[in-house]
């Protein structure tokens, strides 16, 4: 696992040179890369559920609590990548830009999406504050157990994805780097899970 972060870093640094060789259609909405992002996030969600169950079975209440409150974040990211369901409502196709989709306001459940997201975020914030979950990463940093390198690489991947979209107008680069960023989130979560276990065993 220790080599995974360097693999991700190399991918991020070379993404500008790699992505021009990918099919243009991979950068479209509802494309292969976007569905790969959903699959990666779903894997992160599944692994977090497994790690939560392991911590719960071991009686590690602080780790179990931290992990279960991470689940809503994975769900929100999956929802975002699916455009809150818009990908299932195509409205047209353009030869250059690819498929288009109905606006959220025109979906049957559209008016309820933003209020539901707001409720989830508020409940999540209440849980984080109530159980002091925000202290855990800080404590891991103090103990030099937080995966700083993995987190920095993940942030770099998000930054390059934004750069590819907003400034370079390279959709493939954006989608490719987002895949790497989500893999970085899984790697960071894995390292945090292991750090929490080591902290409890001390």
Image (cartoon, rainbow, N blue to C red):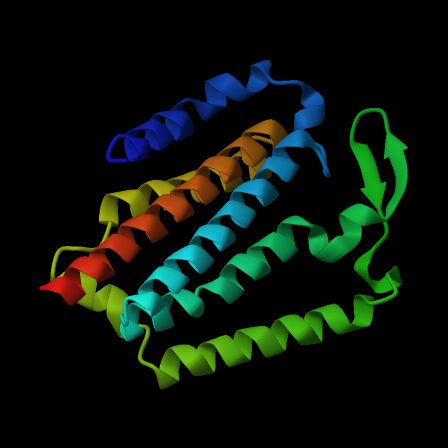
Residue 27 visible in image: no
Residue at image coords 26%, 64%: 137
168 over 44 or under it: above or below: above
Left or right, residue 41 beside residue 51: right
* Position of residue 193 measured from the top left corner of the image (x, y, whole percent): 29, 56
Q: Position of residue 92 (x, y in %)?
A: 90, 38
Q: Residue furthest left?
A: 202
Residue projecting furthest to the bottom: 130
Q: Residue furthest top?
A: 21
Q: In the picture, which quadrant includes the C terminus? A: bottom left
Nearer the observer, 158 or 56: 56
Quadrant of the frame with the N terminus: top left
Say left or right for 116 vs 180.
Answer: right
The residue located at (88%, 61%) in the rendering is: 106
**125 above or below 94?**
below
Residue 134 visible here: yes
Determine whether 6 is above or below 50 in the image: above
Q: How far from the left and from the top, in percent, is residue 82?
A: 69, 50
| Residue at 50 percent of width and 52 percent of height | 46
Q: Relative to 91, does residue 17 appear above or below in the rendering?
A: above
Count of numbered marks: 0
Q: Which quadrant holds residue 131?
A: bottom left
Q: Quadrant of residue 201?
A: bottom left
Q: Position of residue 54 (x, y in %)?
A: 35, 60
Residue closer to the observer: 100 or 41:
41
Q: What residue sits 28% from the left and 72% below the top?
A: 59
């Amino acid at each position: 696992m220790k080599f995974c972060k360097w693999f991700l870093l190399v991918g991020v640094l070379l993404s500008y040179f790699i992505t021009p060789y990918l099919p243009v259609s991979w950068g479209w909405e509802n494309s292969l890369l976007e569905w790969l992002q959903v699959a990666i996030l779903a894997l992160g969600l599944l692994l977090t559920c497994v790690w939560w169950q392991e911590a719960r079975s071991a009686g590690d209440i602080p780790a179990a609590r931290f992990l279960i409150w991470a689940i809503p974040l994975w769900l929100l990211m999956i929802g975002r990548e699916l455009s809150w369901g818009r990908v299932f409502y195509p409205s047209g196709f353009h030869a250059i830009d690819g498929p288009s989709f109905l606006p959220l306001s025109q979906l049957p459940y559209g008016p309820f999406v933003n209020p539901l997201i707001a409720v989830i975020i508020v409940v999540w914030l209440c849980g984080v504050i109530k159980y002091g979950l925000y202290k855990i990463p800080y404590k891991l940093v103090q103990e030099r157990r937080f995966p700083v390198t993995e987190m920095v690489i993940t942030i770099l991947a998000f930054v390059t994805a934004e750069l590819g979209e907003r400034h370079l107008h390279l959709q493939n680069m954006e989608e490719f780097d987002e895949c790497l960023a989500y893999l970085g989130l899984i790697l960071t979560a894995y390292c945090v899970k292991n750090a929490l276990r080591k902290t409890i065993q001390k």
